[in-house]
Image: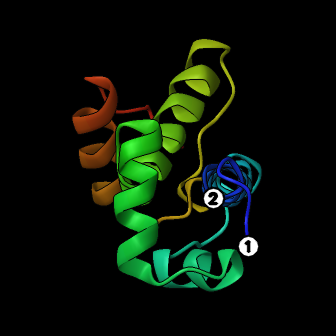
Amino acid sequence: MCRPGWGSARAEARRLEGLARLRRVRDRIDRDYARPLNVPALAREAGLPVGVLVLSFGEAYGRTPHAYLTARRAERAAYAEHTGQPVHTGQLGRAGRAGTTVRNREAAGAGPVLR
């Protein structure tokens, strides 16, 4: 028979393991933001169903994995523009200029100057 506190300790251990998985996904997005990333691949790496990853990530970080990735790309583009570095669409994981400008305008309020 289990002791009374063991059930809650196991639940807490599961919760912490779930947060660690989400942190690994977030770290992967931060590290590989310039590469093509998709949510199903991130979910597979985390060992979670796509829906669970999207909901859990949203609860933990306030936005979906895709929105987090888009915001990171916009932040990096704005930083590069601020420091005078050229911003290339290939560095941002997008195929075209139009998508880059529109996404950055949505996320940061302004699009980068693309070269």
Q: Amino acid at mark 1?
A: Met
User: Residue at point 29% right, 25% down?
Assistant: 110
Q: Is residue 13 left or right of residue 49?
A: right
Nearer-the-camera pick, 51 or 109:
51
Q: Is residue 50 left or right of residue 41?
A: left
User: Residue at point 72% right, 58% down?
Assistant: 17
Q: How was this image coloured?
A: rainbow
Q: Amino acid at mark 2?
A: Gly
Quadrant showing the N terminus: bottom right
Q: Position of residue 59 (x, y in %)?
A: 37, 45
Q: Is label 1 in contact with label 2 (beta carbons under 8 Å)?
A: no
At mark 1, the secondary structure is loop
Q: Position of residue 46 (x, y in %)?
A: 67, 74
Q: Can you tell which quarter of the image residue 71 is in? A: top left
Q: Can you tell which quarter of the image residue 90 is in? A: bottom right
User: Residue at point 42% right, 80% down?
Assistant: 50
Is residue 61 at all visible to an observer of this figure? Answer: yes
Mark closer to the chain start, 1 or 2: 1
State the residue position of label 1. 1
Q: Is residue 99 left or right of residue 20?
A: left
State the residue position of label 2. 7
Q: Position of residue 19 (x, y in %)?
A: 63, 50
Q: Position of residue 106 (x, y in %)?
A: 22, 37
Is residue 91 at all visible to an observer of this figure? Answer: no
Quadrant showing the C terminus: top right
| 65 vs 12: above or below | below
